[in-house]
């Protein structure tokens, strides 16, 4: 504490916050780009889950274009003084910090809604039983309640709305205790939702017979639930500190770091299952071929338990990586000895009915 002015030292934590935001932003953009590319060029199955994830990323990062979104407000706010004690900021910068924080609150909620909805849409693509479908729809409705409630709290804290950042204008704001009560209620619903994200997919995974790639999709949903729940719990004390503090530009750093990590890690984890076919493609391209000299086309069909039409589909998919090594009498052993789960997924994407477990190799 500065003895002469009774103020804390002028320390700046902006670089740490900025580095965290930019690093996670870059990784999230790369993952969403890979996900979208795989769905367009490899599996040719771009769906609602991809559009929702793109929307979540765009809303979260749009300040780079529109100067309004949450991730962007975290970065832009560091230039106006976030990370420093508010006592050392100019009046204009202090107002801008409060304004960016106010705008960022509802946009962070909306962005996270799209990311979670993307994971739900991904699970619905697995075609679970009707009971599980209804549970997923109920979870979606619960998320809508959380978002609407959170946005209402953001806009209702102060009337008029501009009083959130300009304390000189006439108006009223909620008391600290009212804000804390609303925060507890919202976080309780959020944590319950996250628990559902972790538990329900386990039952879906247990119930369904599906390829490994699809099981990874369900596990991705569990991962998002874990990340979100941990961040929701961690955010509670930081939000309490922020609501009770007049030193907003300094106190907000901890909460901003948690929220940046929460949304971007959710995006990253949610994109891992859809890009799994890319790893399969790379494996097929670079894996060392297996020797199968002398094996006839008919023998391969019998060994792999495939119909000729199914065999042709898989050969066409793999030709892009290994045309030069294809056996002229039929597809090569090295091309057809990949993962049974992966082959089943490719066949299903081409309209071939899934086999019972005892029918697969």
Image (tube, rainbow, N blue to C red):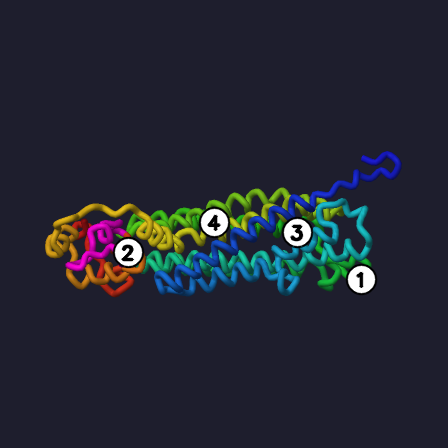
Which region shows up in magenta? 323-341
Give the alpha-carbon distance from disc 2 to disc 3, as whole Å.
62 Å
Q: Which mark is residue 170?
A: 1
Q: Residue at x 49, y 57 (%)?
A: 115
- Describe residue 340's horizontal placement relative to residue 181 as left or right: left
Give the alpha-carbon distance from disc 3 to disc 1, as whole Å.
20 Å
User: Which of the two residues, 231 or 325, is positioned nearer the viewer here?
Assistant: 325
> Which residue position holds label 2?
322
Front disc: 1 or 4: 4
Front disc: 4 or 2: 2
Spot occupied by residue 304 in the image (x, y as percentages of width and height) = 17, 52
Q: Is residue 336 visible?
A: yes
> Which residue position holds label 4?
194
The stretch drawn in magenta includes residue 329: yes
Quadrant holding the N terminus: top right
Q: Which numbered disc, 1 or 4, marks the residue that appears first in the sequence?
A: 1
- Describe residue 164's horizontal placement relative to residue 139 as left or right: right
The stretch drawn in magenta includes residue 338: yes
Give the alpha-carbon distance from disc 1 to disc 4, as whole Å.
40 Å
Q: Which mark is residue 179?
A: 3
| Mark 3, secondary structure of its residue | helix
Give the alpha-carbon distance from disc 3 to disc 4, as whole Å.
22 Å
Give the alpha-carbon distance from disc 1 to disc 2, as whole Å.
72 Å
Q: Is residue 145 visible?
A: no
| Mark 4, secondary structure of its residue | helix
Spot occupied by residue 317 in the image (x, y as percentages of width and height) = 28, 60
Front disc: 2 or 3: 2
Vertical comparison of 206 with 62: above or below = above
Front disc: 1 or 2: 2
| Mark 2, secondary structure of its residue | helix
Q: Which numbered disc, 4 or 2, marks the residue that appears first in the sequence?
A: 4
Q: Which numbered disc, 1 or 2, marks the residue that appears first in the sequence?
A: 1
């Amino acid at each position: 504490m500065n003895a002469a002015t009774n103020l804390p030292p002028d320390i700046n934590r902006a670089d740490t916050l900025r580095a965290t935001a930019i690093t996670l932003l870059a990784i999230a953009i790369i993952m969403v780009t890979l996900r979208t590319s795989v769905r367009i060029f490899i599996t040719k199955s771009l769906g609602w889950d991809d559009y929702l994830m793109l929307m979540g990323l765009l809303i979260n990062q749009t300040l780079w274009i529109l100067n309004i979104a949450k991730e962007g407000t975290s970065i832009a706010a560091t230039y106006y003084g976030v990370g420093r004690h508010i006592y050392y900021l100019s009046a204009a910068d202090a107002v801008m910090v409060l304004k960016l924080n106010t705008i960022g609150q509802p946009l962070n909620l909306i962005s996270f809604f799209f990311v979670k909805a993307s994971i739900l849409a991904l699970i619905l693509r697995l075609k679970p039983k009707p009971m599980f479908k209804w549970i997923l729809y109920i979870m979606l409705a619960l998320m809508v309640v959380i978002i609407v409630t959170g946005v209402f709290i953001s806009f209702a804290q102060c009337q008029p709305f501009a009083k959130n950042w300009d304390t000189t204008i006439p108006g009223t704001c909620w008391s600290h205790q009212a804000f804390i009560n609303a925060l507890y209620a919202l976080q309780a619903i959020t944590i319950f939702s996250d628990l559902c994200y972790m538990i329900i997919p386990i039952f879906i995974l247990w119930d369904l017979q599906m390829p490994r790639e699809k099981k990874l999709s369900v596990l991705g949903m569990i991962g998002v639930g874990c990340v979100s729940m941990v961040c929701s719990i961690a955010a509670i004390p930081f939000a309490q500190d922020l609501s009770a503090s007049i030193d907003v530009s300094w106190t907000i750093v901890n909460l901003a770091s948690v929220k940046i990590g929460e949304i971007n890690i959710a995006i990253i984890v949610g994109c891992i299952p859809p890009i799994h076919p890319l790893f399969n493609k790379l494996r097929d391209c670079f894996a060392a071929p297996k020797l199968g000299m002398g094996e006839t086309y008919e023998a391969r069909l019998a060994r792999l338990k495939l119909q000729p039409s199914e065999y042709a589909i898989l050969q066409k998919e793999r030709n892009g990586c290994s045309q030069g090594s294809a056996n002229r009498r039929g597809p090569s052993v090295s091309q057809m000895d990949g993962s049974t789960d992966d082959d089943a997924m490719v066949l299903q994407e081409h309209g071939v009915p899934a086999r019972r477990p005892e029918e697969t190799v």
